[in-house]
Amino acid sequence: MEVLYFAWLRERIGLPRERVETTAPTVMALIEELKAREDRYALAFSDLKSLRVALDQKLSSLDAPLAGVREVAFFPPMTGG
């Protein structure tokens, strides 16, 4: 699946996107896999309260299932203006 990182997540990880092979059943399980990779991922995902996720461009929750998902995007909460 394609994983996209935006804003400070992209800065901390150092990539705008990457292809990830995973068997994670949920978004949270994917996050745990990513955090276990390297310190930069652990830092990027250290504050889950400041994290939003979209699955195939639809806002989702961290406990959402990943079955059939092609794209996961992580980004900070957005404010309007």
Image (cartoon, rainbow, N blue to C red):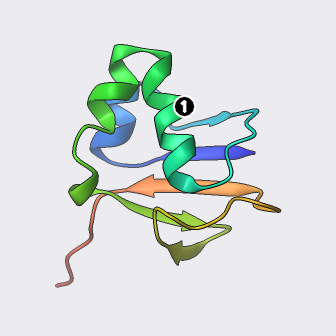
In the image, residue 60 sits, relative to residue 6, either above or below, namely below
- Residue 61 location in percent, x, y? 46, 70
Q: Quadrant of residue 27?
A: bottom right
Q: Secondary structure at mark 1?
A: helix
Circle 1 crowding by C-alpha within 10 Å: few under 14, some 14–19, many from 20: some
In percent of width and height, residue 9 lies at 34, 40
Location of residue 56 by image quarter? bottom right
Q: Nearer the viewer, residue 54 or 67?
A: 67
- Residue 81, how many percent across, how many down? 16, 85
Q: Is residue 63 above or below residue 43?
A: below
Q: Is residue 42 left or right of residue 64?
A: left
Name the residue rendered at 39%, 37% in the picture.
10
Residue at point 38%, 56% (across, down): 75
- Pick the front one: 4 or 26: 26
Q: Residue at x 50, y 18 (%)?
A: 37
Q: Which residue is mark 1?
A: 33
The amino acid sitting under disc 1 is Glu
